[in-house]
Amino acid sequence: MVSSGAGRLGELLREGVVARETPRAPRLRGLLLFVLPLPLLFGALIALGAGRLESFLADASGFALFMAAAYLTRRGIREAHLHDRRRRFARLPRVRLQTLGGLLMAFATGWCVLVSLGQGVGLALAFAAVALLGFHLSYGLVPEAPEQPFDLSDARARKVAAALAEAEQKLIEVETAAARIANPELKARLGRIALKGRRILEQIAERPTDLFRARKFLNVYLDGVRQVTDGYARTHRQADVLALEENFRGVLVTVEEVFDEQHQRLLDSDLMDLDVRIEVLKQQLEREGLS
């Protein structure tokens, strides 16, 4: 009894910690890459004004390559942030945008040394290698992929993983929409809903056979919550705030109750299956004369 109460207390403490964690996007990381190529832009404008077409094309193409590399890196940093902080079941793409950004950054460096500065291929490759090493030390080429919750070697496991990844994406969209809502109470309710939804997904991951029991929850409830939350986030500043807010609050209260019921239903199914296994074992012991 004491251990059960302690376990419940630990669960509540963990939920409180998770609820207070609000992932913050890396706002400034990677922005320096947009600034470093600016001399190439100035050089291209000067060359264009002087009528040096070849120099203009060399500098302009180098600037475009650097900017594309910076854009891919920035998108890759945001992608890695979402996967690391908010994704548990989604599989990462094989080729990461951040890695593509680093490779393109190295190519742009070599291109500028070869075309804009007129140096040899060997020196261009050396500068490209140094740029790639610097990028790796600063940003990393291959961010560490999150550990998969279970083996994906068979078709059934992949089906469960796909369902969990789709459900997790809906929860992420709910959290993204909640960030656009100013009301702290509604935002807190959405945070609790997302937390409870993730707890249900963890239950299914631990016991994949529960996927059938939770299919309605994954396909209907989560999608409905996502649509309602996104709609409120887009329109709550343009409509009758009080009436719309009260209706949305009522929806969220119902959603929290449904999520709690779904969680308890999965727990009850575990207890029911445990009781069946215990009864079978008891009967077997009686047959063997060991009761």
Image: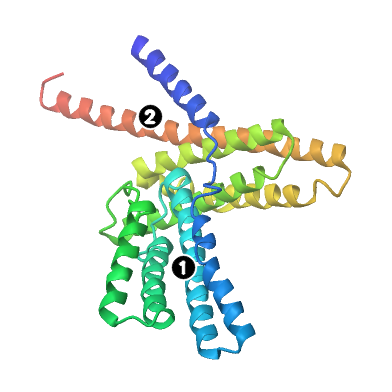
Q: Tell me the number on the disc at residue 59.
A: none
Name which residue lies at 38% across and 64% down. 102
Say what amino acid the circle numbered 1 marks. Answer: Ala
In the image, residue 68 lies at what x, y percent?
50, 70
Please tell me how crowded label 1 is: few (under 14), some (14-19), or many (20+) other residues with Cα within 10 Å.
many
In the image, residue 8 lies at what x, y percent?
43, 19
Name which residue lies at 74% across and 38% down. 182
Quadrant that contains the C terminus = top left
Q: Tell me the number on the disc at residue 271.
A: 2
**Left or right of 184, for residue 141:** left
Labels 1 and 2 touching (C-beta < 8 A):
no
Quadrant that contains the N terminus = top left
Say what amino acid the circle numbered 2 marks. Answer: Leu
Q: Quadrant of residue 277?
A: top left
* Position of 255 relative to 108 (above/below): above
Indicate how the structure is coloured in the image: rainbow
In the image, residue 12 lies at what x, y percent?
48, 22
Q: Quadrant of residue 106?
A: bottom left
- Dot in front, 1 or 2: 1
* Position of 291 relative to 98 (above/below): above
SS for callout 2:
helix
Q: Which residue is nearer to you in this view: 23 or 222? A: 23
Q: Residue furthest right?
A: 240
Mark 1 vs mark 2, CA separation in Å: 54 Å
Q: Tell me the number on the disc at residue 69.
A: 1
In the image, residue 287 lies at what x, y percent?
14, 27
* Position of 248 relative to 287 (above/below): below
For residue 9, say whether it is visible: yes
Name which residue lies at 48% across and 45% down. 86
**Left or right of 167, for residue 160:** left
Q: Residue furthest front?
A: 50
